Image: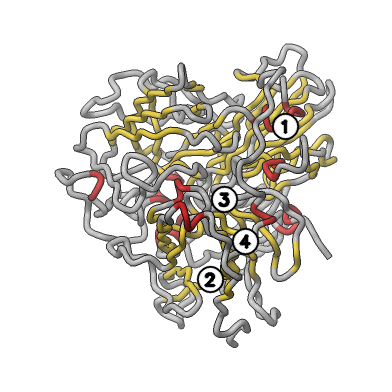
């Protein structure tokens, strides 16, 4: 029986920071945060003009009473601006590293760390990474994995370097939707992202893909996690009594399995904090019963979301039009496709764009994230409010409104991914290993392994790929989870289609770039898995890039692999695909 994976997966203050962008010593409070309960501000929009968007960004950090803070600051002082471009536009982004040393930032997982970055080295070949080095990953975009474009393996920008230029065109065939940018320094990604280093990127034209959103006001909501502001506080008195808080292997609050208790991380919405234990919601005003397009990015380092809008405790229908930057009707079949759900699971790194209808006058409403069961080895992601939604006749309109008279997008040039026979099937699996098997709280190494290879933590010094693919191929990947916690699989440069969930076919005729892989329990006869159809047809996928768990503690701890996509001659691309080959696992059953 088919089922929707939505069900299976459900389980800033942008105050100006004025001053010279390239100042030698930035002021102490360079990454401000709004007060609890504030109105949710909209990120500044930086839009392309005449086919070009030129942006100067500085990445900065500071430490305040609630911990380390990171942020991207534009030349006009806006923090974490939303970059808005059209297909075919040229992005020129100059990134200046103004990070300073911090004992908090340096407390990342050093188990597999290379040496510190050499500030005199070529940033394109300086894969020695440190707490103060940085780079950018443009999550979800199909741009080449090359230096100055979307390379994260060798590119490392040190604080003493001149502004580093990223320059690439948004592909003409890039689906219109929500993408994002964040640092991807191996070993230190978690520290920078959990500190707030992230921003949205929008490829314009979603109304051209789905006319149901034409003319709607749009709201960009970036949900980030951060270290707990009140880690020693008892839970709110409104919560039921839950078991004593335990710590998981990553050092965070462990999953209680109750939906309550201390969370692993606090959350914020557009940098308005919503801290444990009382979760004072931020505020959003809408005109009564107004329809808007909400573009929600889960920019968390480790937190899973399960989003819902509630009127007087009643969940409302949310009309999903795009996932992970890709409209649902990218398959070329379902015109103006909308999936109506009353809650939406979004893994770390995932994005969802949906139509929401505001409450009537006088009706209390909340934007919330419900509990997510991350498994006995996972972190605690309990029920909590994010923002109150208030109907008001004088509510301001969002900054941006979609065109009311869009021209339709041309049909896709390539056959729909779901209709292409895979050239082969590969098997991979997530696993974990305690340094001291007798101590459940000892350090953990995290692995993602191709079946038949020996589990090994990612080595940033190695150029040897775990997987080699020919450009033009389509493959099926079966990814198992042999650990007791939920993992989020992500791959750079491409999107994929979810075909089945632990062997059960799912009806998902749309694409993703990040997906949950269910956790293992001792009662299972086989490891849980997902089957994904991977798309390597785009020439921009040629190169070497990574796939990994998007829980950044796991990625930093070694749960990452290397894939090389080799170019194929034009004549070969026109050949009929060879019969599918399945690379079988040696053992499908869990060891006891």
- Measuring from the top left, give residue 291's x and y in whole percent: 77, 25
Q: CA distance from mark 3 to mark 1?
A: 20 Å
- Measuring from the top left, give residue 238's x and y in whole percent: 73, 47
Give the residue at mark 1.
210
Location of residue 456 (image quadrant): bottom left
Q: Residue at x 67, y 42 (%)?
A: 330
* Secondary structure under the numbered disc 4 in the rendered image: strand
Graded by Cα atoms within 10 Å as few (under 14), some (14 to 19) or many (20 or more), the crowding at tag 4 reads many
User: Pointer 2 and pointer 4: residues touching (CB < 8 Å)?
Assistant: no
Where is 47 relative to 559, above or below?
Answer: above
Give the residue at mark 3.
495
Where is 375 relative to 80, above or below?
Answer: below
Question: Which of marks 2 and 3 precedes in the sequence?
Answer: 2
Q: Which of the two residues, 499 or 224, is positioned nearer the viewer here?
A: 499
What quarter of the picture does the C terminus occupy? bottom right
* Secondary structure under the numbered disc 2 in the rendered image: strand
Q: Which of the two residues, 575 or 487, is positioned nearer the viewer here?
A: 575
Where is 461 relative to 292, above or below?
Answer: below
Give the residue at mark 2.
428
Query: How many dots with numbers?
Result: 4
Determine which of the numbered discs, if any, sits on residue 532 in the image.
Answer: 4
């Amino acid at each position: 029986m088919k089922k929707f994976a939505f069900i299976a997966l459900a389980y800033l203050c942008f105050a100006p920071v004025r001053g010279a962008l390239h100042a030698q010593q930035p002021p102490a409070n360079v990454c401000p945060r709004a007060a609890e309960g504030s109105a949710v501000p909209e990120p500044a929009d930086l839009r392309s003009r005449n086919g070009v968007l030129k942006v100067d960004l500085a990445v900065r950090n500071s430490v305040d009473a609630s911990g380390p803070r990171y942020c991207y600051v534009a030349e006009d002082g806006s923090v974490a601006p939303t970059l808005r471009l059209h297909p075919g536009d040229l992005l020129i982004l100059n990134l200046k590293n103004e990070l300073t040393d911090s004992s908090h930032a340096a407390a990342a997982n050093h188990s597999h760390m290379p040496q510190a970055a050499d500030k005199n080295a070529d940033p394109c070949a300086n894969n020695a990474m440190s707490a103060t080095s940085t780079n950018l990953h443009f999550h979800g975009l199909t741009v080449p994995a090359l230096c100055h474009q979307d390379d994260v393996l060798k590119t490392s920008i040190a604080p003493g370097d001149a502004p580093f230029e990223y320059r690439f065109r948004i592909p003409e065939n890039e689906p219109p939707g929500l993408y994002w940018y964040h640092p991807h320094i191996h070993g230190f990604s978690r520290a920078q992202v959990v500190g707030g280093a992230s921003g949205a990127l929008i490829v314009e034209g979603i109304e051209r893909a789905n006319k149901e959103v034409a003319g709607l006001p749009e709201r960009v909501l970036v949900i980030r996690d951060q270290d707990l502001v009140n880690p020693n506080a008892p839970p709110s008195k409104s919560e039921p009594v839950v078991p004593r808080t335990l710590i998981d292997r990553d050092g965070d609050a462990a999953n209680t399995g109750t939906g309550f208790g201390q969370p692993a991380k606090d959350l914020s919405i557009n940098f308005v904090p919503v801290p444990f234990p009382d979760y004072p919601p931020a505020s959003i005003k809408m005109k009564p019963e107004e329809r808007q397009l909400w573009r929600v990015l889960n920019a968390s380092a480790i937190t899973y979301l399960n989003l819902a809008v509630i009127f007087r405790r009643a969940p409302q229908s949310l009309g999903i039009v795009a996932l992970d930057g890709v409209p649902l009707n990218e398959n070329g079949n379902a015109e103006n496709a909308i999936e109506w759900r009353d809650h939406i699971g979004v893994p770390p790194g995932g994005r969802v764009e949906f139509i929401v209808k505001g409450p009537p006058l006088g009706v209390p409403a909340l934007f919330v994230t419900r509990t997510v069961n991350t498994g006995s080895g996972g972190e605690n992601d309990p029920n909590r409010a994010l923002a109150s939604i208030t109907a008001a006749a004088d509510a301001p309109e969002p900054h941006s409104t979609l065109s009311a008279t869009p021209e339709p997008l041309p049909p896709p040039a390539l056959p729909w991914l779901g209709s292409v026979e895979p050239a082969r099937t590969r098997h991979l699996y997530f696993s974990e290993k305690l340094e001291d098997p007798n101590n459940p709280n000892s350090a953990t190494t995290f692995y993602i392994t191709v079946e038949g290879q020996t589990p090994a933590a990612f080595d940033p010094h190695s150029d040897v790929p775990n997987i080699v693919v020919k450009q033009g191929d389509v493959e099926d990947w079966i990814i198992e989870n042999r650990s007791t916690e939920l993992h989020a699989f992500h791959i750079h440069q491409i999107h994929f289609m979810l075909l089945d969930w632990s062997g059960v076919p799912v009806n998902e005729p749309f694409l993703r770039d990040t997906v949950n892989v269910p956790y293992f329990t001792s009662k299972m006869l086989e490891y849980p898995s997902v089957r994904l159809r991977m798309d390597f047809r785009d020439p921009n996928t040629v190169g070497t890039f990574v796939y990994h768990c998007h829980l950044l503690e796991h990625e930093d701890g070694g749960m990452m692999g290397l894939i090389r996509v080799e170019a194929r001659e034009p004549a070969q691309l026109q050949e009929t695909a060879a019969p599918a080959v399945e690379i079988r696992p040696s053992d499908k059953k869990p060891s006891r």
